[in-house]
Image (spheres, coloured by chain):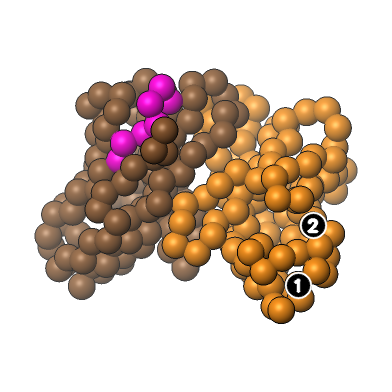
Chain colours: A orange, B brown
Amino acid sequence: AQSVTQLDSQVPVFEEAPVELRCNYSSSVSVYLFWYVQYPNQGLQLLLKYLSGSTLVKGINGFEAEFNKSQTSFHLRKPSVHISDTAEYFCAVSRTKAAGNKLTFGGGTRVLVKP
Amino acid sequence: DAGVIQSPRHEVTEMGQEVTLRCKPISGHNSLFWYRQTMMRGLELLIYFNNNVPIDDSGMPEDRFSAKMPNASFSTLKIQPSEPRDSAVYFCASSLDSLLDEQFFGPGTRLTVL
């Protein structure tokens, strides 16, 4: 079985400040990792994903995440946030041997960007 | 492409009534997923289909829930009878056939059972 823990349920941050959203996973097999963003009253959109190769992954809207196998983490970062980054962010994992691409999501981190 | 289409966007019903949620995946996508999102339980996968065949329905909460995909362009999630604890936002998502393709989410259906 696999699980995903997002350590912060809410993160308030001032505009133009950096933000880091923490994600830890547990799995008995190798996994693929994803970050999704959900803007208010919308569905989820893919920000970035880690499948293999470089452990630093760059995504849309200036976000990046680093895969750390030894710490089983996949933290998301942005060096300077905008008001428009106010949203909920979900970390997700998929097992390499899963049929299809079944995702297990974390509980989400709500980011509130203040002017 | 219009993206994943869900209807209705909002549904308010009374306990005991039948509820049917509808989804049209992106054309050409062969995998379809139904999720439920609540404050208490977060985002949960209910069931997913590949080439119209249910692959994993282990997330379906109980027999009151059923899902069908009669063809590649349409799926339904039915709750009968509905209960207040079924109140949630239900998302449909679709992806291309291969493993790890991005899932594209619809806007969701907000269900309120009184």
Secondary structure predominantly adopted by residues drawn in magenta? loop
Q: Is residue A32 above or below residue A108?
A: above
Residue A8 horizontal/vertical position (percent): 70, 68
Q: Residue furthest left?
A: B17
Q: Amino acid at mark 1?
A: Glu
B83 vs A114: above or below: above
Q: Is residue A82 magenta?
A: no
Q: Which residue lies under the disc numbered 2?
A: A78
Quickly name the residue at label 1.
Answer: A15
Give the quarter of the figure containing the N terminus of chain A: top right
Mark 1 and mark 2 lie on one chain; the one further toward the N terminus is: 1
Quarter of the view holding residue A10:
bottom right
Taking the spot 83% from the left edge, 45% from the top edge, the residue there is A66
Who is closer to the viewer here, B54 or B96? B96
| Element type where label 1 sits in the image | loop
Q: How many marks?
A: 2
Q: CA distance from mark 1 to mark 2?
A: 11 Å
**Along the line of sight, which residue is nearer the eye, A5 or B62?**
A5
Residue ID at (82%, 69%) = A17
Q: Would residue A91 be seen by someone viewing this image from the given angle?
A: yes
Amino acid type of the residue tagged 2 in the rendering: Lys
Q: Chain of mark 2?
A: A
Read off the chain for label 1. Answer: A
Q: Position of residue A7 (x, y in %)?
A: 71, 64
Question: Which span is picked out in magenta?
Answer: B23-29
Numbered badge on residue A69 = none
